[in-house]
Image (cartoon, coloured by chain):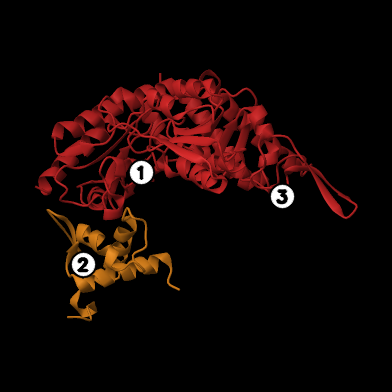
Amino acid sequence: MSSFKERNIECILAILKKQNPATTKEIMAMRDLFPDLCAGCSSGGDVILAGKELVEQGVVEREWTSTGFVWKLISSHDENT
Amino acid sequence: MVIWSRIRKDFPVLNELYDGKSLIYFDSACMALKPVQVWEAMEYYYKYLGACGGAGRSTHSLGVETSLLTEEARDKITNFINAESSNEIIWTRNATEGLNLVAATISLEKDENVVTTTLEHHSGMLPFFKRCKETGSELRLVEAKEDGTLDPADFEEKIDDKTKIVSFVHASNLTGTVAPLKEVVEIAHEHGALVISDEAQFAPHQKLDVRAIDVDFCVLSVHKACGPTGIGVLYGKYELLESLDMFLVGGDVIEDVVYEGNNVIPKYLPPPHKFEAGLQNYGGMLGAGAAIDYLQNIGMDNVHNRELSFSKRLLEGILELDKFEVLGPLDYKQRAALVSFRPKSDAVNHNDIVEYFNELVPNHKILMRSGNMCVHPFQYQIGIKPNKGEGVVRASLYIYNTVNEIEIFLGALEDFAKAIE
């Protein structure tokens, strides 16, 4: 069974594989599509933490824009591209 | 006169750079920073004692000193909230445990009801929700006003002669609202109901006098009062504590367990010990005592007056920008030193705002909290939907903050507002 943190990471990856790139707001809105993975606290702090972990791992890039942070799955990690 | 710059020096983390930036800590409603004096008191226990304390347990020198110091810490809490006796002070893990203890053990019949509010922290509501569900009792909700204030008249409507207990928050961790506790206690007592108040956000910031207010139970969160984590306090009037059943049982709570005729007959200690099962967080108790000493030395009136000036500037500064919706009353005198807000434009998720202030402000890391602050019902009530990823940002201040930090924050907030236009 995946840990809470691992599930949040899988949640973000699943969302970014569906829509890449995506803002934090878009990611939060899409969590309902993956209820088994995205079961973290509804406030979304865990989403940010998981996203930052993926940035550290070099799997995701993050950029600040006027609509907030945009998260982008780096193409080499995106099986769909 | 308090020299606030000296106070700040007691918190080394504020005098260090983090990732090359100065820290501005605006998350004290979640967790207050700890002064040197607190961790020195805890270090003393772990370095020089490290033994069991508690009712008649270890009678060797280290055990005796541990017991003496922990009971001294209990006396400090007694004095801090003006309880009548230290036997009315129970050590818990946190405020949540104290609320659960009362909710789980108070006698409650099916035809009785419990009154609480939509502004409660989940810890003040859910233990009673759970208990009412178990007993089939009614849980009645007083709705806070749109501005986060609570009207005693609304309690008049909900409380009746079948109300067992009223659970409500003295100062809200979401809106900062300071509630009319004394008036509600009077209404409850007129109907023979008890009151338990959540003092997690009030007691660290203003003088609390449980006898003047005549509240029956209250809970304190030590980690929000410059103390260590993992330690909290439940206060209860002694005769009420005597009547309550235990929440946990085991070692340290009994005078004897007689074995007779293939039966065991436990004889429990009186309060507070009957509620403190198992070996306790002795280091935490010493840290709690040191934290109370620290606040008492500053003076709670000084703490409150300083925070009033913070509230005024912080609230006015955010409102002047006219880009953010502020939760709670707009009169700074009606609130604690915290402001929860969100952009009027709804362009940016609240988590991004906190991350922006954590990472993207030049020269400073401004640390705040985002989310729903464990007060979902009130947010649904005013149209913020936690289940849709909506929430707020909270800036909460304490004794170590400065007016200059507020100005830096307001400048950064103005820049942020421009950045999302």
Residue annotated with mark 1? B377
Disc 2 chain ID: A
Where's residue A5, x and y in %? 39, 65
Label 1 sits on what residue type? Pro
Camera sees residue B3: no
Q: Which residue is rendered at x = 53% and y = 32% of the image?
A: B165
Instruction: Tell me whether marks 2 and 1 sit on the same chain.
Output: no
Q: For the residue carrying disc 2, how many other residues have a C-alpha within 10 Å: few (<14), some (14-19), or many (20+)?
A: some
Chain (red): B
Disc 3 chain ID: B
Q: Is residue A60 left or right of residue B41?
A: left
Residue in the foreground of this view, choosing between B33 and B144 = B144
Label 3 sits on what residue type? Gly
Residue B342 higher or lower than B399, as above or below: below
Residue B374 higher or lower than A65, as above or below: above
Residue in the foreground of this view, choosing between B253 and A72 = B253
Q: Which residue is rendered at x = 26% and y = 26% of the image?
A: B312
Chain (orange): A
Residue A61 — which label?
2
Q: Nearer the viewer, mark 1 or mark 3?
A: 1
Residue in the foreground of this view, choosing between B313 and A27 = A27
